[in-house]
């Protein structure tokens, strides 16, 4: 009789455990579905979910690509103020300490909101970007620090004028003490720099 009671207790405990596990997966699936737009994962979701502490881009090119993905979202997506701020925090994770010191988050956020509003007022979007090939990226050392120069072309579509415009930017990156490439700054350049 005792053996039968023990077996029943074990079966009941297994059923309760299975119910708890099933409930966990049901709630997780429902929460994940709420995080997706129409059941699809958005680029904004993907960018915000990236953990830069544990999964930082390995090369200077990959850092600029991640930056450019965020930039494209700023000018192409209908973002909430919260999303703009969260994307800015992700972007600031790519910047060198020197850049961050000269650009406090609050003023950086205000400038960014003005740029987004300017793009929207001009009905301008970034349709694509192209990051320079690894073989063309210039690297050098100065005072024991490693630097890299990465060129990107951004294709903008001006809806009012119905024309495309290419903008070239040159990024300067520096490796930090942990060996991560960080963006020091960037400036406009021309098509020849891409070669």
Image (cartoon, helix red, strand yellow):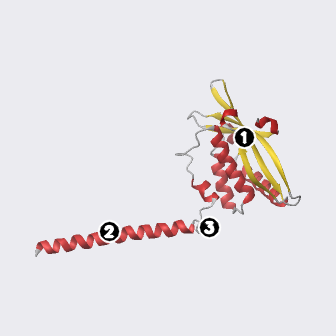
- Residue 193 position, x and y percent, is 78, 35
> Quick check: marks 3 and 1 in contact, CB under 8 Å?
no
> Which dot marks residue 161?
none
Q: CA distance from mark 3 to mark 2?
A: 32 Å
SS at badge 1: helix
SS at badge 3: loop
> Quick check: marks 3 and 2 in contact, CB under 8 Å?
no
| Above/below status of 14 relative to 57 | below
Nearest-to-viewer mark from 3 and 1: 3
Nearest-to-viewer mark from 1 and 2: 2
The mark nearer the N terminus, 3 or 1, is 3
| Above/below status of 167 relative to 195 | below
Q: Residue at 11% of width from left, 73% of height from top?
A: 2
Residue behind mark 3: 37
Name the image quarter holding residue 65: top right
- How many other residues sit within 10 Å of disc 3, few (<14), some (14-19) or many (≥20)? few
| Above/below status of 75 relative to 102 | below
Residue behind mark 2: 17
- How many other residues sit within 10 Å of disc 2, few (<14), some (14-19) or many (≥20)? few
Q: Quadrant of the N terminus?
A: bottom left
Q: Residue at 27% of width from left, 70% of height from top?
A: 13
Q: CA distance from mark 1 to mark 2?
A: 54 Å
> Which dot marks residue 102?
1
């Amino acid at each position: 009789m005792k053996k039968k009671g023990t077996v029943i207790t074990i079966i009941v405990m297994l059923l309760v455990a299975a119910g708890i596990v099933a409930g966990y997966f049901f709630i997780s699936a429902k929460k994940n579905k709420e995080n997706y737009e129409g059941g699809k994962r958005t680029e904004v979701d993907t960018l915000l979910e990236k953990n830069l502490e544990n999964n930082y881009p390995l090369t200077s090119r990959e850092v600029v690509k991640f930056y450019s993905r965020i930039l494209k979202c700023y000018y192409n997506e209908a973002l909430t103020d919260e999303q703009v701020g969260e994307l800015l925090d992700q972007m600031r994770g790519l910047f060198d300490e020197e850049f961050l010191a000269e650009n406090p988050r609050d003023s950086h956020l205000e400038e960014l909101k003005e740029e987004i509003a300017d793009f929207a007022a001009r009905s301008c979007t970034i349709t694509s970007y192209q990051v320079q090939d690894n073989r063309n990226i210039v690297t050098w050392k100065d005072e024991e620090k490693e630097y890299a120069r990465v060129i990107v072309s951004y294709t903008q579509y001006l809806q009012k004028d119905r024309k495309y415009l290419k903008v070239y930017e040159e990024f300067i990156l520096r490796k930090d003490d942990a060996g991560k490439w960080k963006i020091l700054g960037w400036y406009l350049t021309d098509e020849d720099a891409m070669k």
